[in-house]
Image (cartoon, grey):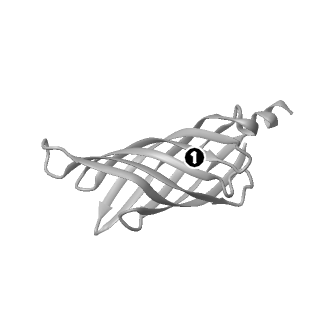
């Protein structure tokens, strides 16, 4: 498998929060985040990332799960899931978790990929993320 790493800067295109009355400070948040990937691996560099996440938070700390799609200029895509933790402490919100590709199209048909991510919220609508992992394209497995 090939190792890769990169970064992502995203902006919330859609976001909403519902305050729950069971515990003080409990919220369910839903967001769609979009932006462009940066990587030294040409298969991921400049891929447009869109992800949809659901966070279950108490006072800004809790879990997140969601789905993502990376789309390239030629239309090839890889799609997957992520899950992790959101932590808010001393006015800073950080993200940490794992990601795994589930399906793909074009040269990403049959791709196997996964790894970890770390990030931080930089404003109410913006975030920065770094990620790393490993992948193998089906064409590489067949060779």
Residue, x 33% and y 57% (percent of image)? 87
In this view, the residue in front, 47 or 120, is: 47
Q: Tag count in the figure?
A: 1
Quadrant housing residue 1? top right
In this view, the residue in front, 74 or 83, is: 74
**Left or right position of 9 against 1:** left
Read off the residue under disc 1: 115
Q: In this view, does 60 lie above or below 22?
A: below
Q: Position of residue 77 (x, y in %)?
A: 66, 41
Q: Label 1's element?
A: strand
Q: Where is residue 105 in the image (x, y as percent from the top left)?
A: 69, 35
**Left or right position of 87 against 23:** right
Residue, x 45% and y 44% (percent of image)? 52
Q: Position of residue 119 (x, y in %)?
A: 46, 60
**Left or right position of 34 against 114:** left
Residue, x 57% and y 46% (percent of image)? 115
Residue furthest right as drawn: 143
Residue, x 76% and y 33% (percent of image)? 138
Q: How crowded is mark 1: few (under 14 residues within 10 Å), some or many (20 or more)?
A: some
In this view, the residue in front, 139 or 20, is: 20
């Amino acid at each position: 498998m090939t190792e890769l790493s990169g970064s992502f800067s995203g902006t919330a295109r859609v976001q909403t929060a519902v305050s729950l009355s069971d515990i003080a400070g409990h919220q369910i948040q839903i967001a769609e985040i979009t932006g462009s990937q940066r990587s030294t691996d040409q298969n991921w560099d400049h891929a447009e990332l869109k992800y949809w996440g659901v966070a279950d938070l108490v006072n800004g700390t809790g879990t997140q799960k969601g789905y993502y799609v990376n789309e390239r200029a030629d239309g090839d895509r890889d799609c997957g899931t992520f899950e992790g933790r959101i932590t808010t402490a001393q006015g800073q919100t950080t993200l940490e978790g794992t990601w795994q590709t589930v399906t793909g199209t074009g040269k990403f048909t049959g791709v196997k990929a996964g790894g970890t991510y770390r990030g931080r919220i930089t404003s109410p609508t913006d975030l920065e993320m770094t990620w790393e992992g490993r992948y193998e394209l089906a064409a590489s497995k067949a060779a």
